[in-house]
Amino acid sequence: MGKLALWIKETRPQFLILSIVLTFLGTSIAWYYGSFNIWYALLAGLGLTLTHGSVNAINDYFDYKSGIDLNVKRTPFSGGSGLVPEGKLALKQALGVGIVTSLIALGIGIFFFIVSGWQLIPLVVVAGIILVLYTPVILKTTWPEWSPGVGLGIMPILGLYFVQTGEYSWIVLLAAVPSGIMVHNLLLINEFPDVEADRIGKRRTTPVVFGLEKASKFYVAATIAVYVWIVGCVIATLVSGTVIMPVWCLVALLSLPFAIKAIQGARQYGDMNKLIPAMGSNVIFIMLTHVLLGIGYILDKAF
């Protein structure tokens, strides 16, 4: 495998699909409210994808430095890329991948500062702080899962909306909440197999601090909250006459079977044969729900 292929693999490209579906949803919302720029959407999506890849690479760097990568139980959905501990990629190269991708993403951010407005700066600065501090600092504080929920769930939706409309909206913030919860849950359930390794690395993830039983209940409650929030926003739309979330967004309920499978597996966290398929169902639930929400916005405007 060539160096370029290894560098790409270090970003864990199979997980960068999340950035693509976030771009789709954020752009669908902007289009629904009357603004759509395909080139800005694609460029912002690229910046988001690079940022996501940077987080993955930097996380690998710190995981190896702390010894977590030497103790982790790697699964298809957790445990890092494995390239550094397997000797396929030098530690400094993993860090280099993280730095280069983040710098390119920053360049894209600066472009949007110029063309879309300075109001984007606070959003990018906060997201950047979360990116830099996530592995070395935030993961050592209680309930660190909030940070990817905000930085890689809510903020991308707001950012994609802003670069295409030039403004923020509290309605879009409400629409982004399910994304925040789902990205939070993506990290949460993927931490279940890593409890011992994270404890050695002095991380304070929810499963480490509160135990797997409480963490699994938290995961279940948060997953249910995604659907409650969507239905609640649609009801608020019908009652108030103000579009909080279009009625067609109820199509997102079609992802419920995958959410149920994820919930069932999360509650059987002690059995890896059931937990790993649950982690896979969780990924499908999250990706599909984002796509369906975006389709909901498109269908509501179309009809």
Image: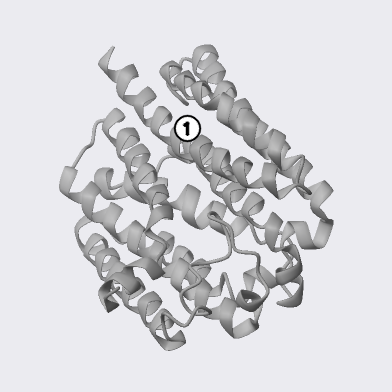
Horizontal side, residue 128 vs residue 278: left or right: left
Amino acid type, residue under disc 1 in the picture: Thr
Q: Where is the N terminus found, in terms of image quarters?
A: bottom left
Report the residue at 44% width, 22% height from top.
249
Q: Where residue 243 sits: x, y (%)?
A: 43, 22
Q: Is residue 119 visible?
A: no
Q: Which residue is mark 1?
A: 289
Q: Where residue 52 sits: x, y (%)?
A: 41, 61
Q: Relative to 131, say whether 300 is above or below.
A: above
Q: Residues within 10 Å of mark 1 (few under 14, many from 20)?
A: many
Q: Nearer the viewer, residue 288 or 70?
A: 70
Q: Where is the C terminus found, in terms of image quarters?
A: top left
Q: Where residue 297 sits: x, y (%)?
A: 35, 25
Name which quarter of the figure residue 169 lies in. top left
Q: Relative to 203, say whether 249 is above or below.
A: above
Report the residue at 42% width, 62% height from top.
12
Query: How many numbered marks are there?
Result: 1
Q: Nearer the viewer, residue 119 or 42?
A: 42
